[in-house]
Every structure is written in structure tokens, then in C-alpha cells.
Image: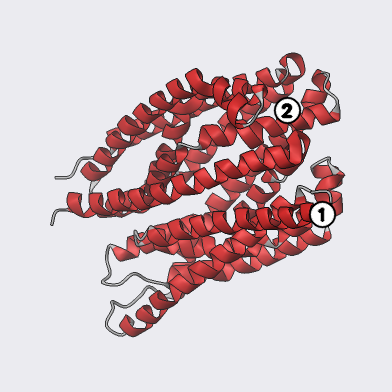
Amino acid sequence: MSMKSKNQHPLIMGAFILTAAGILTRLIGFVYRIYLSRQFGDESMGIYQLLSPVLSLSFSLTAAGYQTAISKLVAEQAATRKSPALAPLWLGLGISLPLSLLCNGVLFFFADPIALRLLQEPRTAVMLRILSFSVPLSAVHSCINGYFYGIKKAGIPALAQLLEQITRVGCVYIVSGYFLSQGKTLSISIAVLGLTVGEFFSMLMTIAAIRPQAKKGQNTAVTSARPAPSGMLLGKLLAMALPLTANRIVLNFLQSIEAVSIPAQLKAYGYDNITALSVYGVLTGMAMPFIFFPNALTSSVAVLLLPIISENYALGNMDTVRRATFKTVKYCGLMGLCCMGAFVLLGRWAGATLFNSPLAGYFITTLGFICPFLYLDTTLSSILQGLGLAGHIFVMNVICLLVRLGFVFLAVPRYGITGYLWGLLASQLTLGALYLACLYRFLKKEPAAA
């Protein structure tokens, strides 16, 4: 069997599994968003969305870099060993889990000052305490998912993702129904409870899935090639994870500034607090998830491209890397153009019909123009990660965020939320151009296989 067919098969099958699960997950999430918007209102959705930077920053601190490093190390070892190694997973968990527990404690005990001083919304304090317990749960299942991505078994992460969404939505629906039956007022904190419950069940499933792999690893340890010393492996893990973690922290910090500043700048434009939070909630809680819905396909391909690109680059199969890159640019770009046409033509109808919000329709129509770059950037980033260009990705993403922040502070006070939409368009165009230029220069200087 040729290297080409060996690598195409897991990519195609893995992408199909992840995409099927991703589409189903997003369909459930799409209906869920409609339910939240109608049950809790635009202002509550805006308050709920203020938690996104905290969640992203917590994930960056505790799990994101280690998941990617585990996936990359497992993929590299799988290329040279008869059985995949579990050592990168155990080492990653040994670092990620204590960090996540520390983050859990900080968010729980310092929720009030974080809500008041950082998020500038005291009503998020209770939600932060509930959210804090999701951090260690997410760290565990993210590291385990990294292992399964590394061995190109996408089914477990896909099912875990689906289970997380089902249990999240089910929890919110059941608890909301109970409160309504008792005549009590609903709080958006219920949605945060659902998020934590979803993470718990996802963690349980991934733990159950890794146990047979751990037993198999123990049984084959004697016959397998001698593993690398744990100190050397830990050094490689940290060498990959720490730059990724640092990069993600800086990026999420900038994103946090952006998220907190948008409502504040909308108030500078002339909105009161309720209107500013409502507009922010419609944009980030309704329109943007709708735009990101087709990204289920490109995200699935991106996750599986990382170990495949890493493996082939480590083996010197640059022709395979080039073919994968060309096909990625071709098909993701085509999909983005098709989605752009659909959103531009049907965006206003979708906002009014699905969310009962003409403002959401305006946002969907305008944001439709970023689709060709948005979907392509997801997969290009994964290819660049696989080629070891994490530092370049970091610099390019910082440039992209600085462009957006410039529009937040300079355009939003003058033009309202329209100024931020211009910023999103400009930043995605900038990022896409930078990614393509970087990838072109790298592949041009790499020699083809002999």
C-alpha cells in the first residue's frame, strides 16, 4: 500500500466521522441557541457571551497546548513504532490536570473581583463559579482526545463531542422546565450549568475509551521498541506545548480585551447598558454561531490534518504535504464561496425566521463575506502547525487581532456595531493573506522528494 493511500484513508474516514458528528452537534447547538435566545432574551445572551473569554483563556492555560503536543508526539511515534505510545498522554495529563485544578480554584474563589473588574458585569460572578468546575473536566478529555487524534481514531472525540452537546442541552431543558413548572424566574446561569454537565459526561466517555488502550499498551510494552526516556519525552512535550500555550494565552488575552470592550464602546456610541449587551448578544450568541455552522467540515479536516502533516513532514514526504495543502486550499475555498452566497442571499430571512431578530439577519448577511477566508484559515492554521510554524501562526494571529481591536476602539464609537463588522472582514482577509504567503514561502524552499 502506498504512502498516499495510507494517509488519504484516515483523513477521509476521520474527516467523515468528525464532520458527521460535528454537523449533528451543531444542528443540536443551533436549535439550542434559538431556545436560549427566546427563553432568556438578548441581554441575558450578551451576559452569557461575556464568559467566552474566560472559558477560552482557561482552556489555553490548562489544555490547548498539551492536546496539540500530545497529538503531534503520538503521531510521530506511531510512524516509527508498532504500537502507539501512551507516555505523551500521561505526561500531558500530569501537567494539564494540576493546572486546571488551580484554575478551578482561582475562578471559584475570585469570581466577584473577576466579574466586577475584568468582565465589568457583576451578574457573571455566580456563573463564573459554576463554570470553574468545567475547567478540569475539559482538561482531562482534551488530553485524551489529543491521543486519539494522534493515532487517527476520530470516532472517540467525535462521539464525546456529540455526547457533550446532548447532555448540555438536555440538562438546560430539564432544569428550565422544572423552574418554569414551579413558577420561578429563569436565570442564564442554567446554561452555564449545562455546559459543565456536558463536560462531565464527555470526560467520563473519554476515560472509558482510553482504558482498553492503556491495557493494550501494557500488554505490548515488552515487545514494542524501547520508548524514549521520560525526561527526553517530557522535554519534547514542553518544547511543543509551552510555546503553543503562551501563544494561546496572549491571543486569548487580546480576545478578552476585544470581548469586554465591544459593549463598552457601544455605550460610547450612544447605547445604554441593556441595548449594548443585547446587540452584543445577538452578534456573538446568534449570528456568529450561524456563520460558523459550516465550519464543522473544515474544523474536522483541520484536526486530522495536523497529525498527518506532522507525520509526513517528519518522514520527509513533502510531495504528500504539498498535495494535501493544495486540495485543502481548493476545496475549503470553494466551500467558503458557496456559503458566502447562501448567507448573503438568505441571511435576513434566516435572522427574522429562526431568531425572530432582524438585527441577527443583518449580521448574518454582512458576516457572510468572511466565509471564504474563515473556513480556509482554520485548515491552513492546522497545516502550518504540522510543519512546525507555530511561532509564525502566533505573530499572524496577533496582527489579525490588533486589526480588530483597532476597529473596536476607533470605528465602533463612531459607527456602532457596523464598525466592528468591518473590522472582522478586514482581519480575516489579512489573516488569510498572511497564512497563504507563509505557507507558499515554506513549501517553495522545501525540496521535493527524490
Residue 77 drawn above or below residue 173:
below
259 sits to left or right of 206: right
Please, what is the three-letter code of the amino acid marked with disc 2? Val
Check the picture and name the quadrant holding the N terminus: bottom left
Foreground of the two, 237 or 268: 268
Residue 438 point in image, percent of width and height: 40, 32
Asked whether 205 or 386 is in front, the reply is 205
Which one is nearer the viewer's eye here, 256 or 31?
31
**SS class, disc 2:** helix
- The quadrant in which residue 155 appears is bottom left
Residue 313 in sight from this viewpoint: no
Q: CA distance from mark 1 to mark 2?
A: 23 Å
Which quarter of the rendering shows the C terminus? top left
Q: Nearer the viewer, residue 211 or 365?
A: 365
Asked if disc 1 and disc 2 are in contact, CB closer than 8 Å, the reply is no
Label 1: state its secondary structure: helix
Q: Is residue 298 left or right of residue 352?
A: left
Closer to the N terminus: mark 1 or mark 2?
1
- Residue 279, numbered label: 2
**Disc 2: CA contacts within 10 A as few (<14), some (14-19) or many (>=20):** many
Task: Look at the image and name its color scheme.
Answer: secondary structure
**From what the image shows, is residue 164 above or below residue 385?**
below
Which residue is painted at 35% across and 62% down in the image?
A: 151
Mark 1 residue type: Val
Residue at (28, 35) in percent of width and height: 327
Identify which residue is drawn at 21% across, 55% down.
Answer: 6
Image x and y of residue 43, in percent:
78, 35
